[in-house]
Amino acid sequence: MRNRILTGFGIAISVILIFTSVLLIYRYINSTYRYYRSQVERLFADVESSDKELISQKDLIDLPAPVRKYLEYVGVTGTEKVRNFSVVIDGEFKMSQDRAWAPVLVEQISFTDNPVRLFYMELKFLGLKIFGLHHYESAAASMDIKILDVFKVAQARGIEMNRSETVTIFNDMCILAPAALIDSRISWREIDDFTVEGTYTNAGIAVKGVLFFNEKGQLINFVSNDRYFLNEDGTYELLSWSTPVGEYREINGLNLPGYGEALWERNDGQFCYAKFNIRDVTINSGLE
């Protein structure tokens, strides 16, 4: 009897070891970060070298006064026109209203001429690591979320996702790379001395955002009604989305916000799902 128990125990251990090995191999091959880095490498390989263009006061002339004041505050004059930017963020993230906050780490690379956004995140919830990737390219967007980098628990694609991520592209330009607002794809409507509405169009998708500034010229909030909320049952809902920012500091020579939040205005109340500390922003970064 004792030998049978030992034999059974040995078989169980072998099965567990084989399963674990297969899982690790699968995870390595299908690693979210590995895929993210491969896409970054591909994008930089496709970029054609060009002469550096510097921003002058002439580039700001046609912008609405609040936006012009903002770019002057950020300090974009004399810097390079934005071709790409990379971002490092940490903070907290909520996957739904009734769940606890989870620590999150984010890496992002974006290109502006032919808009591309790769947003990679890792978070830890109830002891489990969760990996996510948002990919926007050629006006098509996708989102994939995996537990332990193996089991897919959420994904999104389609018209609603494309429109939502176009809003995010515009939002990133406003907050992370303000010099990118010198762009013919944006039309402006000045509302008052501290508020403007911008319409950003890419590949036939036009989205609006309202930018709010303070007396210093700092951007303090961005609000859009063109972004879709993904419900847990897989349905979409068009809701007001905002990203208040603050704690401005110098980041690589520019005055940028160091902290931001992301909120949805739901029928059952406001839902803040992200609190981000912006650790680094590099304009026209090379492949690292």
Image (cartoon, rainbow, N blue to C red):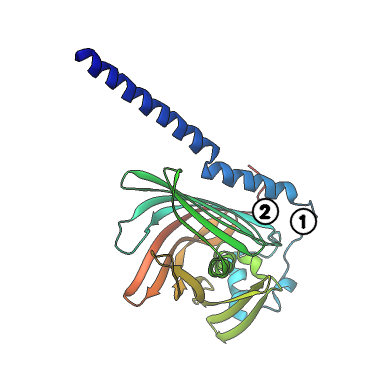
Q: Is residue 190 above or below residue 217?
A: below
Please state, as top left, top right, bottom left or bottom right, where the C terminus lies in the image. top right
SS at badge 2:
loop
Q: Name the disc covering residue 40, or none.
A: none
Instruction: Assess disc 1: are there few (<14), some (14-19) or many (≥20) residues with their C-alpha within 10 Å of its C-alpha.
Output: few
Q: Residue at x 61, y 78 (%)?
A: 199
The amino acid type found where label 1 is placed reads Lys
Q: Position of residue 281 (x, y in %)?
A: 57, 54
Residue carrying label 1: 52
Residue carrying label 2: 284
**Image-quadrant location for residue 50:** bottom right
The amino acid type found where label 2 is placed reads Asn
Q: Residue furthest top?
A: 3
Labels 1 & 2 near each other (Cβ < 8 A)? yes
**Image-quadrant location for residue 198:** bottom right
Q: Is residue 267 above or below residue 249?
A: below
